[in-house]
Amino acid sequence: MVAGANYGQGSSREHAAITPRYLGLRAVVAISFARIHWQNLANFGVLALEFTNAADHDRIQQDDVLLLTGTREALVTGTAILVHNKTRDEAYPVRHSLSTRQIDMLLAGGLIPWLRERRAQDTPTNPRTFAHGSAIPRRSSISGRSHEALRQQKASTLKEGRNRPQEKLPTNTA
């Protein structure tokens, strides 16, 4: 799909991304995206690409045949992505704004398949990893410390609390 500026504006509900994905849409090339819709596209495994040069949008006509090739490799390696217009024998450079996590999510087919894969891989002997091999740090989103460090701190605090002498509370003699 080729779209103009602020594609998805007013379509913050996930259905605006689910329906095209269900119908087979795998990528949208646009001048720009509405923020929430852009995230919803990623969540449902639809690649959101922006024209590097906005004027390239106007070069594409209805019924032009466009090809995206080598996209998976380009996403993983960070190399340039080109949209090839077979009808006009032209190529348009495009870019994405996806994080490493979003790339892995997209390559898995969306958020739900990605979470399913992570859960299957997440065992004590097999830490979570991204699709391209780097480890996912298991950190608390609040403190930045690992879950194991937080668990040990909590156990230590509980143990200290049990060993601490009990304070006598004043009694009311009235």
Image (cartoon, rainbow, N blue to C red):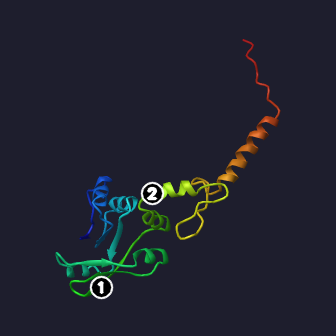
Q: Position of residue 108 (x, y in %)?
A: 45, 63
Q: Is residue 17 above or below residue 78?
A: above
Q: Position of residue 160 (x, y in %)?
A: 79, 40
Q: Is residue 113 above or below residue 98?
A: above
Give 110 or 167, whichever is nearer the viewer: 110
Q: Which mark is residue 57?
A: none
Query: Label 1 sits on what residue type?
Result: Ala
Between marks 2 and 1 in the image, the one whose residue lies nearer the viewer: 2
Q: Is residue 99 above or below residue 138?
A: below
Query: How far is the residue under mark 2 from the one under mark 1?
Result: 32 Å
Query: Label 2 sits on what residue type?
Result: Pro
Q: Which mark is residue 91?
A: 1
**Residue 111 located left or right of residue 6:** right
Taking the view exactly as shown, the residue that stands out farthest to the top is: 174
Residue name at image x 49 percent, y 55 percent: 115
Q: How many marks?
A: 2
Q: Which mark is residue 113?
A: 2
Q: Is residue 168 above or below residue 137?
A: above
Residue name at image x 40 percent, y 76 percent: 71
Q: Position of residue 123 (x, y in %)?
A: 63, 54
